[in-house]
Image (spheres, rainbow, N blue to C red):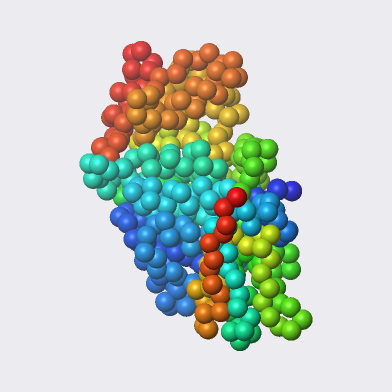
Amino acid sequence: MREFLTGNYAAAYGVKLSRVEVVSAYPITPQTSVIEKISEFVEKGELKAKLIRVESEHSAMAAVIGAAFSGARAYTATSAQGLLYMYEMIWWAAGSRLPVVAGIVTRAIAPPWSIWTDHSDFMTLRDAGWAMLFASSAQEVLDMTIQAFKLAKELMLPVAVGWDAFITSHTAEPVEVPPQEQVDYFLGEKKKSPAAVDFENPFAHGALAFPKDYPKFREDIHRTLKAAGEVYSNIERRYYEATGRERYGLVEEVFCEDADAVMFIMGAAAGDAIHAAGELRRKGLHVGVARIRSIRPFPRNEVEKIARRASKVIVFDRSYSLGFGGVLATEVRSVLHEEGVDTPVISVTGGLGGSDLSPEYFEKIFLKGLGV
Amino acid sequence: MVELPVARPSVGAAGKTGNWRLFKPSIDYRKCIKCLLCWMYCPDGVISLSGKGLPVIDYEYCKGCGICAEECPVKAIEMVKEVEG
């Protein structure tokens, strides 16, 4: 069924189709309409879920953690300051190995106040033990949200699905909504997570770990996330088999095959970069775009392969590690160094606080990268 | 299989926590009405019931939080300062 949906409504459809049982809600622009639409589904009886209105984002994450401990499929969504306010519980969710899913509608962090997109909020999840997927269209928001529940279950870790404020969250596009039975088939029988409370075999969570025990829990999460690329690829394949929807991999490659300069980029602005690359190709310049769809697991193999073929790598970041530089660029450089790839890397940061990006802007970056 | 960061129930996993106590709950059995509220409220599960249905505190592990004294409806539990040394 084809619907005309914003990115936020597409997320709500993904949640409904995944038969989520508990949703915690605390409003923040630009995330609000995700929860509003879910609440409408619950009111109409189209989604049999408990919608919990909480007093803060810290409680919003705590509520889905509790729900996941009871074995329920749980979801929440937030942005910027909201994500920062739930940050303590973000780590609890991962450390407790709970399969919750959170939508992160990316928004610049205050001060100064901004409601527009950049990826600084999303990137704060990087070291917390979450899987982190990033969509660039409403369709992808829907598909990734459904896939996220399966990924969370298989990894026994929380999964964040990010998408850009307004550009993706509030722009309506035609979205192919898969039939319920296809999603049911894809997600399979709901099995109780091993991390959920078992009354026959009680445990206390939040216990103290002495120094000799603590590291192994971190190593476990590290290992799981490092190997998660293959898990996600399998999930995408199974999703394709169930619904016929497109497969992209951890990195969507556009014109990368014979490109001299390749730009790594994440999120909605990839559309502008791809448009720019198309224009430059018409002028005979060999440029390509590699759209990163997952930060954790980080697509090491894909990044290495793409960069090895190119003579110049440009990494476009919509977030800063203040005082150091682009977060994505740092990760790409690190992988290339470890793999012994000496393709030069140019780091460009832009689009912060929703500042405008355009195909012309990306054309200029490509030309600079090519030294033209 | 992932090892979960959880603790399974066991006696004295954190050592003899009775050493933490500053005040000791002392039950006056002449006042006790066997309502078992102290037994129910004890967060450490260190109150058990005697054959006669009276609450008995295990002082090896009682941390002296005072919740039993607070909840006792007939004020049969007094918090007594531990003697130093």
Image quarter in which the C terminus of chain A is found: top left
Expressed as whole percent of the image width and height from the top left, the position of residue A209 reads 63, 45
Expressed as whole percent of the image width and height from the top left, the position of residue B28 reads 60, 78
Residue furthest to the left in view is A112
Expressed as whole percent of the image width and height from the top left, the position of residue A310 reads 51, 19
Asked where in the image residue A285 lies, by quadrant, the reply is top left
Give whichever of A321, A310 is nearer the camera.
Answer: A321
Residue furthest to the right in view is B51
Residue B68 drawn above or below residue A267: below
Asked where in the image residue B36 lies, by quadrant, the reply is bottom right
Residue A59 drawn above or below residue A340: below
Identify the residue at image location x=46%, y=15%.
A344
Residue A272 visible (yes or no): yes
Number of marks present in the image shown: 0
Residue B25 drawn above or below residue A270: below
Q: Is residue B9 left or right of residue A35?
A: right
Identify the residue at image location x=68%, y=41%.
A213
Expressed as whole percent of the image width and height from the top left, the position of residue A237 reads 64, 47
Give whichever of A209, A256 is nearer the camera.
Answer: A209
Identify the residue at image location x=25%, y=42%.
A111
Residue A11 visible (yes or no): no
Asked where in the image residue A289 lies, by quadrant, the reply is top left
Give whichever of A55, B67 is nearer the camera.
Answer: B67
Identify the residue at image location x=68%, y=54%.
B16
